[in-house]
Amino acid sequence: MMKRTLLFVALSILFFACEKEEKTAGEWSKLAEEKRQDIERLIASTTCHDISEWSVFTHGDPYGCAPTHFPMHPSIKDEFDRLWADYLYFNREHTNAMIKEGVIIEPCWDEGWFHHAPIRLACRDNKASLVYIHDLEIEESKEQIAEIYPHIEAYLAELTCENNEGWTYTVLYNNDCSLSYIPVKRTNERSAIRTDIEFYNAHRANIVNKEKLDCSDRSYEYPDGIICEDGKPVVKTKTY
């Protein structure tokens, strides 16, 4: 009887040890990707006739540079929530496994303001789709830039300073692949001009990409400090 008990205990320990065997980062990544594909299939299987019935699901990933977005219909929300919870678990375990394996996860530095989110929803071939700025035709982006840029000009015209302290900068994309640098006051609050610059940069990038400009043979200017000149903050640059 004692031998049987010991054998049972030994087998139980072996069983649970096998059950708790750690997966590799690659294995967790595969599980997360499979779950994400399940989510995409669920959404694709839901017919889209009236886009007003749909909304945008958004989730911010602390290890991601931009939030995740999906089209959402009330009829699939419960199933979506279940799949999404599984995906988050697998993705979190993937991150933990990467860290255990010695992978250094670099943070996403906020070097430029760019609009990543979808701008609207649309029914395409009876399926709900997210429409991003990079999906737009060039003319629509040009029309949007014509509306946005006067706001940026007004912002720059109103900027004043008393000294060099408390300033940083953000990037403004130009129409010839070059960059301009816009002075911004350091603050914990969201700058009022940020939304305009995010949309402007996304529309400008859409135009540059679709016009297939050759940006390979040119020099670039890089920021080299911000100074207060005649009551106006100025981003000094150097060419490399």
Image (cartoon, helix red, strand yellow):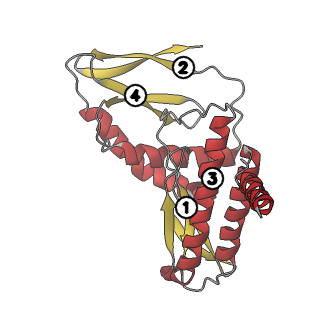
- Asked where in the image residue 72 lies, by quadrant, the reply is bottom right
Mark 1 touching mark 4, by CB under 8 A? no
Category of crowding for the residue at label 2, using alpha-carbon neighbours closer than 10 angstroms: few (below 14), some (14–19), many (at least 20): some
- The residue sitting at 50% across, 44% down in the picture is 114
N-term-proximal mark, 1 vs 3: 1
Judge depth for marks 2 and 4 and give the one in front.
Answer: 4
Compute the Cα span from label 2 to label 4: 14 Å
N-term-proximal mark, 3 vs 2: 3
- Asked where in the image residue 70 lies, by quadrant, the reply is bottom right
Mark 1 touching mark 3, by CB under 8 A? no
- The residue sitting at 30% across, 22% down in the picture is 233
- Find disc 2 in the rendering and name its residue: 221
- Asked where in the image residue 190 lies, by quadrant, the reply is top left
Task: Identify which amino acid the numbered label 3 is placed on.
Answer: Asn
Task: Identify which amino acid the numbered label 2 is placed on.
Answer: Glu
- The residue sitting at 67% across, 82% down in the picture is 126
Query: Is residue 136 at all visible to an observer of this figure?
Result: no
Judge depth for marks 4 and 3 and give the one in front.
Answer: 3
Quarter occupied by the C terminus: top right
In the image, residue 228 sits, relative to residue 186, either above or below, namely: above
Tell me residue 211's x, y (percent): 68, 46
- Find disc 4 in the rendering and name its residue: 169
Task: Identify which amino acid the numbered label 4 is placed on.
Answer: Tyr
Compute the Cα span from label 1 to label 4: 28 Å
**Residue 69, numbered circle:** 1
- Find disc 3 in the rendering and name its residue: 91
